Image (cartoon, rainbow, N blue to C red):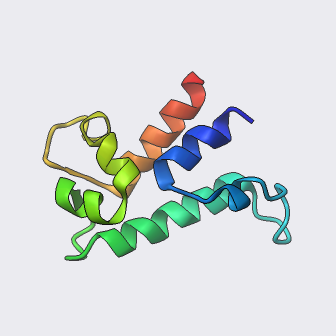
Amino acid sequence: MRLLPALIIIVGLTPCIALSSPQSDGGSSRAEKIADHAAQKFAQADVNHDGKLTLAEAKQGMPRVAAHFDEIDTQHQGYVTLAQIQAYIRDRATTR
């Protein structure tokens, strides 16, 4: 149960999704739902569809990612990718 709050904070899920049962949709786990939601939010926030979120894009479409942008952008490239966001979520989940 500690894993879920960290993931919710990052991807901005609503509490009702977080409280759903692990198999409520016929087989998908909560982690899969969160990953799917993150991918959807990323796609919406990536306004120029280059596979990268700048800080400005993150502020507009994924504010919780924007709040942790420097931590996620470990290579200090000025953008984050979905893979980096997912890695950050996994790392945060394992440290809690």
Q: Quadrant of residue 13?
A: bottom right
Tell me which residue sits at (30%, 49%) in the image: 66
Residue 94 vs 26, above or below: the answer is above
Tell me which residue sits at (35%, 54%) in the image: 63
Q: In screen coordinates, is 93 left or right of 60?
A: right
Q: Quadrant of residue 61?
A: bottom left
Q: Position of residue 40 (x, y in %)?
A: 47, 71
Closer-to-camera residue (18/88): 18
Q: In screen coordinates, is 39 left or right of 34?
A: left
Quadrant of the drawing holding the N terminus:
top right
Q: Position of residue 69 (x, y in %)?
A: 27, 43
Residue 45 vs 13, above or below: the answer is below
Tell me which residue sits at (85%, 66%) in the image: 24
Q: Position of residue 65 (x, y in %)?
A: 36, 49
Residue 36 vs 19, above or below: the answer is below
Quadrant of the drawing holding the C terminus:
top right
Closer-to-camera residue (75/13): 13
Q: Quadrant of residue 70?
A: top left
Q: In screen coordinates, is 70 left or right of 78?
A: right
Tell me which residue sits at (70%, 61%) in the image: 17
Q: Which residue sits furthest top?
A: 95
Q: Which residue sits furthest left?
A: 77
